[in-house]
Amino acid sequence: MQLLRNRDVVSLIVLGVFVGGIFALNADAIESATPEATAPPAASVDVAMVASHRITDWHEYSGRLEAVDHVLIRPLVSGTLTSVHFEDGELVRKGDVLFTIDPRPYQAAVDRAKASVAAAQARAAYTATDLARGKRLRANNAIAQRDFETKQNASREARANLLEAQAALASAALDLEHTRVVAPISGRVSRAEVTQGNVVNAGPGAAPLTSLVSISRMYASFDLDEQSFLKFVHPAGADMNAAVFLGLANERDFPRKGRLASVDNRLDSESGTIRVRAIFDNADGTLVPGLYARVRLGAGQARDVVLVDEKAIGTDQNKRFVIVVDQDNKTAYREVQVGAGEHGWRAIEAGLQAGERIVVSGLQRIRPGDPVTPKQVAAVAGPHNTVRDALARVAQTADNS
């Protein structure tokens, strides 16, 4: 019996050793197989090689349109308004009659002035003849010196009175002319502020009859910040040849090209800006004073910058970054400073060099340090076949990004 028990114990020990060996072998096999089984495959991503391109930076500003000429039409003579010769908002030409003030009192004044001129002319002619006769008598000592001087003084006085009468006639004729209120410029007239039958008064304080603005050209006024003024506009004289483009609120991009017209002579210390005006042609009459204007101003000379697809730029809180792929096809985090951008492209001011490869698609599937399977794509895609075309109208600077 004791012998059987010893055999059972030996059998159990042998069995335990055998089973333990099997588990040990399996554990080693599992441990050695785990890294190979759990290693993730390299993600497939689209990469592009960035390049340097020569572009011109543009700055975008907000402003308002202003008429080149704006005239308040006021009466120059007093009287009853007898006619209004235009429709509200009508286009008028220089010299067109806008209003008529009752001309009859002024016509009467002209007639009186003409009569005075005629009388003065007759008096001047008579005294001139009398003086000529006095000269002949004086030559023969047939007239006293006193009488001759009297005739001479009368002739001079008659000529002076004639000049006075002629000046009065010119003034009366001018008043008569002012009864026809004409357009001093060509443009679009506003509504008639005074209607037919009302009495109007002359003078600088008189209420305006209407207003008139020119439309052939239009100013776009905007404020240039101090930093941009110091950087792009020489303090001793603005570059009036800088390219300027305009877009209205309902227009895409900036289809209208103009030029700088003026830069103010002082900077507003409260706002830190200086007033700038650009001028644009308005052949189609679309530009109206007071409209909101989006203005793009070319800043400085063309320069070389690295351009990347905006889809390749990620945001990390207040930082911007790209994922760079090295020669071993491993990714690396790279913080960049972005600059101007438009049409899906962005200039990189710092942090990236031409010739480096960056991930342009699949940022969500990778982390820095991961191996990737790069798929090379073209640097430019979409409707523009060159980067220069894509950034032909770059609008915003890094400060506005």
Image (cartoon, helix red, strand yellow):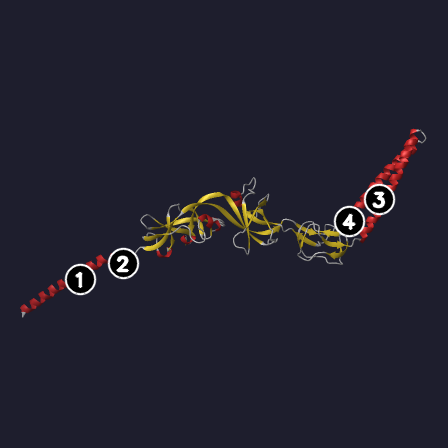
In the picture, residue 40 is in which quadrant?
A: bottom left
Residue 230, relative to residue 7: is it above or below? Answer: above
Label 4 is placed on what type of residue?
A: Asp
Mark 4, mark 3: which one is toward the viewer?
Answer: 3
Residue 304 in the image, given as x and y percentages of width and height? 44, 44
* Residue 175 image label: 4
Mark 2, mark 4: which one is toward the viewer?
Answer: 4
Please give left or right for residue 1 compared with residue 37 in the image. Answer: left
Residue 125, relative to residue 283: is it above or below? Answer: above
Give the alpha-carbon distance from disc 1 to disc 4, as whole Å.
Answer: 123 Å
Give the alpha-carbon distance from disc 3 to disc 2, as whole Å.
Answer: 118 Å
Residue 271 visible in the picture: no
Relative depth, front residue between 113 and 23: 113
- For label 4, the SS is helix
Q: Which residue is mark 1?
A: 23
Q: Which residue is mark 3?
A: 117
* Residue 38 image label: 2
